[in-house]
Structures are given as C-alpha cells and as structure tokens.
Amino acid sequence: MSKAFTKEDDSPPEDDLEIEDGPALPAGAKNYITPAGLKRLEDERKQLVRIERPKVVETVAWAAGNGDRSENGDYIYGKKRLREIDRRLRFLTKRIEIAQPVDPAAQKNREQVFFGASVTYAHADGKQHTITIVGIDETDADNGRVSWIAPISRALLKARIGDTVELRTPGGAEKIEIVDIEYPDGASK
C-alpha cells in the first residue's frame, strides 16, 4: 500500500503516557524549595531546551528524510525521546513557576526545626539519624534529604533540641528525641 494512503499517528502509545515526571504536591501546598534546588531545576530546563532537544530534533529530521518511517529506528526512538523531553520540560516549567524559594541560611530562629534544617534525632534504642528538610523536588533519601511534607519532617517541624516528638509509622507510633539542629551556614543551637 502506498504511503500516501496511510495515516501516520504521532500520538504516544498508551504505555508511553505518564502522569508526571516527579512527585506530586499535595492539593493547596506551596512548592517550597531551596535556592540551590531551584537553580538545579532551572539548569536542567536550560540543558533540555538549549542542548538536548535541538540534538534530538536534528536526528529526527535526518531520520525522517531517510524514507519509510515505520521501520526507521532513529525516527521512532527520536520521536519517543522528544515526547519524554517535552513532558519533562512541561513539568519543570510548572514547578519553577510555582516555586517559593526559602533560604535556610536566612533562618533567624535557629533553635527550632524549620525548612532547610539538618536535624539529628535519636530513637528509643539510642540509634541516631540525621536528615535535612528540603523541597519535594530536592529529595534524596540516600543522602538524608527528606521532603518537608514527609511524615518524619512534619513530626520534627517546630521542635527544639531535647524535645520528644511522636512519629507515626506503619508499625505504630514511635517517640524520637531531637539531638541537634543545624542550618546551612554551620551555625547551630
């Protein structure tokens, strides 16, 4: 059958559709983020727009000029990659637009736990853990960076050194004690 009589469908296959490229914000919640986290999002968006997307567009244009697109791997993969890039760009743009930067170094009350604090806490068995409370787009569990909306962060917010707070876990409530609070510039209380 002639290519002139077939319809080429550029819509993504159903298994390609994803809701978003990152964690969802709770309804009505603000998108708090550190200045460094906001810069990382902006840098990623800039990288995608200025470097990666133009390269993929060039590859797709070249591949489209090679004839039959139905069996052209460069074309098919390139179109799929363009959809991924565009989806990520939409996500980053939305997140950057609603971002509310909060500089933890500017925190005046360093005796309480607020956004951006690094908090060391102890469990009843004496085991200590340190986490840093950051924005939802900055989380990195392997490095102890926990979202401000996570249950542990919510339990710690506004606590002071020596306070015992209750952390609700799937295994039941657990008491944890705040051992230390630090903010980025190294000042602690």
Image (cartoon, rainbow, N blue to C red):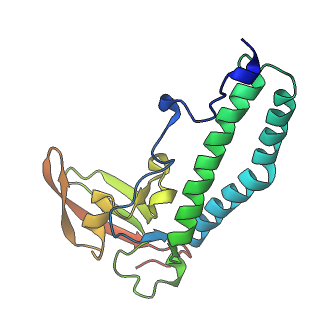
Residue that protrudes farthest toward the left in the picture: 172
From this view, report whether residue 24 is shown above or below residue 110: above
Q: Say which residue appears at 66% left-offset and 63% top-offset.
A: 42
From this view, report whether residue 10 is shown above or below residue 110: above
From this view, report whether residue 85 is shown above or below residue 78: below
Q: x, y (%) of residue 107?
A: 47, 83
Residue 72, visible in the rendered structure: no
182 or 8, which lies in front?
8
With 181 as the anchor, is 126 left or right in this view? left
Quadrant of the frame with the C terminus: bottom left
Q: x, y (%) of residue 30?
A: 41, 72
Q: Quadrant of residue 57?
A: top right
With 181 as the anchor, is 11 left or right in this view? right
With 99 as the anchor, is 78 left or right in this view? right
From this view, report whether residue 50 is shown above or below residue 156: above
Residue 48, visible in the rendered structure: yes
Q: x, y (%) of residue 76?
A: 70, 26
Q: Quadrant of residue 90?
A: bottom right
162 or 115, which lies in front?
115
- Total tally of numbered discs in the picture: 0
106 or 90, which lies in front?
90
Q: x, y (%) of residue 78?
A: 73, 32
Q: Say which residue appears at 28% left-offset and 65% top-offset.
A: 154
Residue that protrudes farthest toward the front in the picture: 5
Q: Say which residue appears at 24% left-offset and 64% top-offset.
A: 177
